[in-house]
Amino acid sequence: MFSRAYKTAVTVPPLLWVTVFLLVPYALLFCYSFWSVTPAQTIAHHWNLGNYRELLRVRVYFETLLRSMWIAARVMLFALLLGYPLAYYLSFHAGARKDLLYQLVIIPLWVSYLVRAYAWKTILGSDGVLNTLLQYVHLTRHPAEFLLYSPFAVVLTLTHIYTPFAFLPIYASLEHIPRNLVEASHDLGASPLQTFWRVILPLSIPGVLAGATFAFVLSLGDFLAPLLLGGPSGIMISNIVVSLFGAAYNWPLGAAISLCMLLLVVSLLFLSERLEKKWSYS
Amino acid sequence: MELLVSAPARNPRWLALYAALVFAFLYAPILVLIVYSFNGGGVGGFPPHDFTLSWYRVLLGDGAMWSSVLNSLTVALAAMAISLLLGIPAALALDRASFPGKAAFRRLVLLPLILPGIITGLSLLMLFVGMGLHLSLLTITLGHGTALISVAATDIFAGLQKLDRAQEEASLDLGANYWQTFWRVTLPNLRLPIIGAALLIFTLSMDEIAVSFFLIGRDNTLPLEIWSRLRRGMTPEINAISTVIFVFSLAAILLWYRLRARPEGQPELGAELVETAAAN
């Protein structure tokens, strides 16, 4: 029903734009990672593997990547531990308040990321809200210094930020479970726990995988929360990239790290997609 | 509704309590933020004391802050225009045309939302430097507009899937050309997904920082202005501007629910996007 001209008119402009402003930039990132910086601080455009050799040689890059993955894994775990029961409660037990509660989970997403990280900073600081509260009720006498400027602060803040992201796909998958399956399980004599374990949980795995991927990937590349709350021990891989693109001025090395990160993220997305397909019942 | 009531045997108390605790975790920092914007004693310290509006007065007279708000509004509106102008045809193309690389195109468009913002930011920086463009609000706008095409494309594509093709067919049969049909039949039918996408793009752009961080020129957007002040030290003025933004965001959500006249079956704001991103 639609003519060739129509199809061309709707296809070509977005295709061209996306090629110029997305495909070319990502390709540039790839190219840069094989270039190098001259002592005169210009980019030398001859291809070599020097940056990747550097990444293997200097331990701090690999260690920081591992630390970032460890932080991201903890955020993922906590986001699931908070998000899943919440989604389950809303989907199966909230009754008439379901829609309202759903909105209440979404609303924090509208508060600026930066502002929420800042709020945690005002809470966790040594003269912050939490420490002064603890002293006010005489639970502690001296401020707990470990709260701020630590990986703990980064994990806590990122968990706060990404729990709604983990919640959303889990909730969607729970909502898609046909209720007559749950009822059949009850009718056939399964206890609520058995029903959850054998019917609901397996059917919600695709949502769990999607939520886990969101939380892990989004926190892996974060660089603002570590700068604001992490202190020296909370530095993450993106912070190294930022410094390489700033004061340290080594774009090619920064590009190589970014490309590794990109490959890691894309393969995780691919893996999670495969697993989701395997677990989906339709 | 009946199914929901009959299926679970009882309503476990501990689960409700747990859910309440998660809500407390989600809202505590926001509450602290708002309360301390009225605190005469600064950003920390319990209990809050000396209720004051002076931080709002400081904010009102803060020219740099307001010009960054103006910059952010300009960027968000322009990014919204770019994303919609490209996202609407992209959705039509995904719905109606077949072209080589269609699956790849779909994934590529979604990448900026799924990849860490730093990667997209750096890549665009390399492009703009290569093109010899000076970093400015224009480069940030191009970045936001491009990164958020997927929001428009996803929402509008979902709308197109529900659209009754017979209407467009009838319009074409009755002698309207494609342009007239698009303008008078297709577009009006997509009103809700377009408004929803526009609101979402606007808010995401207002809040975006990772991409902007690398594309910033001389003029700050609001998040970058806040960022530069945080590095200098914390003042309740940040709480005040955050509270103001929060109130406006809430107003935007309420506005969306008023517009979304039909309560049944309409997607929640952003829900399509999350589901598509999750399925990709």
Image (cartoon, helix red, strand yellow):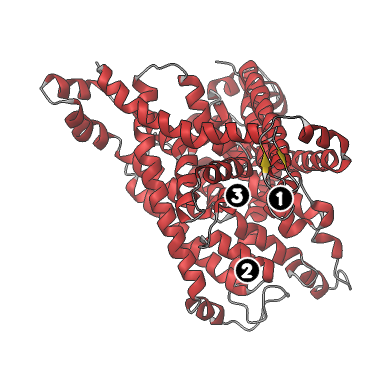
Q: Residue furthest left?
A: B175
- Is A217 situated above or below B94? below
| Rendered image: mark on residue A249 | 1
Q: Which residue is mark 2?
A: B229
Q: Nearer the viewer, residue A61 or B203?
A: A61
Callout 3 secondary element: helix
Q: Could you tell me how far apart the alpha carbons at marks 1 and 2 are, in whole angstroms?
A: 24 Å
Q: Position of residue B104 (x, y in %)?
A: 51, 22
Q: Amino acid at mark 3?
A: Ala
Q: Nearer the viewer, residue B99 or B219?
A: B219
Question: Which chain is mark 3 on?
Answer: B
Check contact, mark 2 vs mark 3: CB within 8 A. Answer: no
How many other residues sit within 10 Å of disc 2, few (<14), some (14-19) or many (≥20)?
A: some
Question: Which chain is mark 2 on?
Answer: B
Q: Which residue is mark 3?
A: B210
Q: Nearer the viewer, mark 1 or mark 2?
A: 1
How many other residues sit within 10 Å of disc 3, few (<14), some (14-19) or many (≥20)?
A: many
How many other residues sit within 10 Å of disc 1, few (<14), some (14-19) or many (≥20)?
A: some
Left or right of B194, for residue B32: right
Q: Quadrant of residue B242?
A: bottom right
Callout 2 secondary element: helix
Q: Position of residue B70 (x, y in %)?
A: 43, 64
Residue at 78 percent across and 56 percent down: it is A230
Q: Quadrant of the C terminus of chain B?
A: top right
Residue at 45 percent across and 46 percent down: it is B142
